[in-house]
Image (cartoon, rainbow, N blue to C red):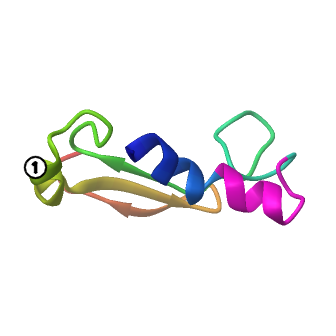
């Protein structure tokens, strides 16, 4: 399911490399790269996922991409 897929690319790799204290989830004091979409990727119907667009991307805590719509 989607939750397992999300964990497979976030928390599980951090745990595998022994870095879950600093990576793998969005919490104060942890490093996080993230993408904000214009819809809920966890709730959208599967066939609608390709229509969702990134509106903001953070890499190393800095804005790497920001949609003109923001």
The residue depicted at 68 percent of the width and 50 percent of the height is 11
* Residue under numbered circle 1: 48
Asked which secondary structure carries label 1, the reply is helix
Quadrant occupied by the C terminus = top left
Residue ranking furthest to the front: 1
Identify which residue, 32 or 65, lies in the foreground. 32
* Residue sitting nearer the eye, 4 or 56: 4
| Residue drawn at point x = 10 percent, y = 49 percent | 48
What segment is highlighted magenta in the picture? 11-20
Residue at 22 percent of width and 43 percent of height:
38
Question: Residue 57 placed where, x, y %?
Answer: 42, 58
Is 62 situated left or right of 57 in this image? right
Q: Is residue 28 left or right of residue 7?
A: right
**Does residue 13 show up magenta in the picture?**
yes
Picture quadrant of residue 18: bottom right
Taking 37 as reference, is 43 above or below it? Answer: above
**Quadrant position of residue 8:** bottom right
Image coords of residue 58 (percent x, y): 51, 57
Residue 21, position as x, y percentages in the image? 87, 46
Query: What is the quadrant of the N terminus in the image?
Result: top left
Q: Is residue 59 left or right of residue 65?
A: right
46 up-or-down from 14: above or below? above
Q: Is residue 44 magenta?
A: no
Picture residue at 17% right of the left edge, 48% below the top: 46
């Amino acid at each position: 399911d989607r939750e397992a897929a999300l964990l497979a690319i976030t928390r599980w790799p951090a745990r595998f490399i022994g870095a879950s204290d600093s990576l793998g989830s969005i919490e104060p004091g942890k490093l996080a790269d993230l993408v904000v979409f214009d819809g809920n990727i966890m709730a959208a119907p599967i066939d609608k996922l390709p229509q969702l667009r990134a509106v903001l991307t953070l890499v190393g805590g800095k804005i790497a991409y920001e949609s003109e719509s923001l």
